[in-house]
Image: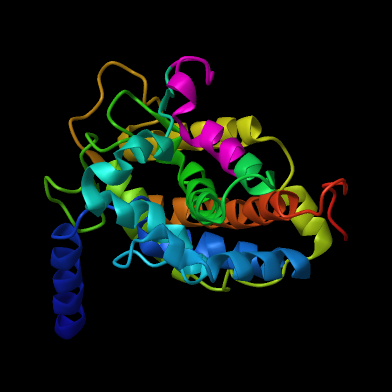
Amino acid sequence: MIRRLLALLALFSAVLATPAFAYWEYGHETVAAIAYKNVRPETKRAIDRLLRQQGLLETPTCPARTIEEASVWPDCIKQLGPRFSYAYNWHYQNVNICKPFTLKGNCPDGNCVSAQIERQVKLLQDPKVPQREKVMALAFLVHLVGDLHQPLHAGDKGDLGGNRAKSDYGIYSTDRLNLHSIWDGWLAERAISTPPPLVHVYPAGERATMEAGTIEDWSRENWQIAHEAYAVAYGDDPCAPDQPARGKLDDAAVDKLVPVLRKQVTRGGLRLARLLDEAFAPPASAPARAS
C-alpha cells in the first residue's frame, strides 16, 4: 500500500512539473485510435499515405508518423514558439455556461475549435492544396475533434476553460490543480483505463447513433457537459453567486463522471471517423458511409 502511494505521488509530481497539454496524450491518442479502427479501409489507406509524408512538416521533434502521433502534434508544436502561434486559439471555444449557448462572438474570425474542424476537412477535400498543408490539416483535424470532446474546451465561466477554477481531485489538493487539468488528465486517464477497452470496431448501429449531428450540435453537447463538470465540483448551481473558492471531486463524483467522459471519448473517436471518411471520400461520391 505504501509503495503504491509513493508511486502515485511520484507520478503526480512528474505531471505537475510538465507543461499542460490539452486532453494530455492519452485522451487524444485514444480518440485517434478509435477513429482509425472505424474508418473505411480506403480512408485508412489514404491516412497512411499522407502520414508517410510527415517529413514535409519539418518538425523533427514533433513527429506525425502515425495517427496517434498526429493527434498530439498540434500540442507538441506549441514548444516551437512563434512558428505556429497563429493556431493557439484553435483548440477551444469557451462559451459561457451561465448564458444561452451560441457560437456567435465566441469564435472570432473563425479562430476556434469548431470552425477549424470544418476548415481542416475542407483542406483535405481540396485537390489543389499542397501535400504539406494536407498533412498539417490531418493532424489538426484529428487533434481538434479530440479537443472539442473535452468539455472544458467547449464551455467555461470566463476562467480560461476551468484553468482558474481550483479544485481538489480525491486526496490531491494543490494550487496547481484545477478543473481543466483534472478533466484533461486525471479524469481522462481514469475513464479511458476503466474496462472494457474503448478502442475497437463499433457496430454500425452504435456508430450511427454516436456520430450523428453537426459540429455545432457537438459543441452544444459539450457545453452542456461543461455545465455538469462545474456542478459536480462546485455545487448543483455552478452559476450561483456564492460559489466556494475551491471545488472538490471526491470518489463519488469521480465515479459519476467516468462514464460521462468515456462516452465523450467514444463519441469523439466515432465522429472523427465520420469526418475522415468524408474528407477522404472520392470526388463526386456521397459522404454517407457503408453500414
Question: Where is residue 184 shown, x and y percent of the image?
Answer: 36, 52
Task: Please state if 20 lies on the left or on the right of 59 as rendered.
Answer: left
> Residue, x 63% and y 62% (percent of image)?
35
Residue 192, can we see it?
A: no
Task: Please state if 223 lies on the left or on the right of 241 as rendered.
Answer: right
In this rendered view, identify the residue nearer to me: 275 or 211.
275
Quarter of image, res 197: bottom right
Question: Where is residue 215 shown, x and y percent of the image?
Answer: 63, 35
Image: magenta residue range: 99-120
Colouring of the image = rainbow
Q: Is residue 105 magenta?
A: yes
- Which part of the image, by quadrant, shows the C terminus? bottom right
Up-down relation of residue 58 to residue 123 (above or below) = below
> Residue, x 20% and y 72% (percent of image)?
8
Q: What is the tally of numbered marks visible in this picture? A: 0
> Residue, x 29% and y 66% (percent of image)?
61
Residue 213, can we see it?
A: yes
- Which part of the image, by quadrant, shows the N terminus? bottom left
Task: Please state if 82 lies on the left or on the right of 212 as rendered.
Answer: left
In this rendered view, identify the residue nearer to me: 55 or 176.
55
Question: Where is residue 74 shown, x and y percent of the image?
Answer: 39, 52
Up-down relation of residue 23 to residue 248 (above or below) = below
In this rendered view, identify the residue nearer to me: 241 or 178.
178
Task: Please state if 50 lies on the left or on the right of 167 as rendered.
Answer: right
Q: Is residue 5 magenta?
A: no
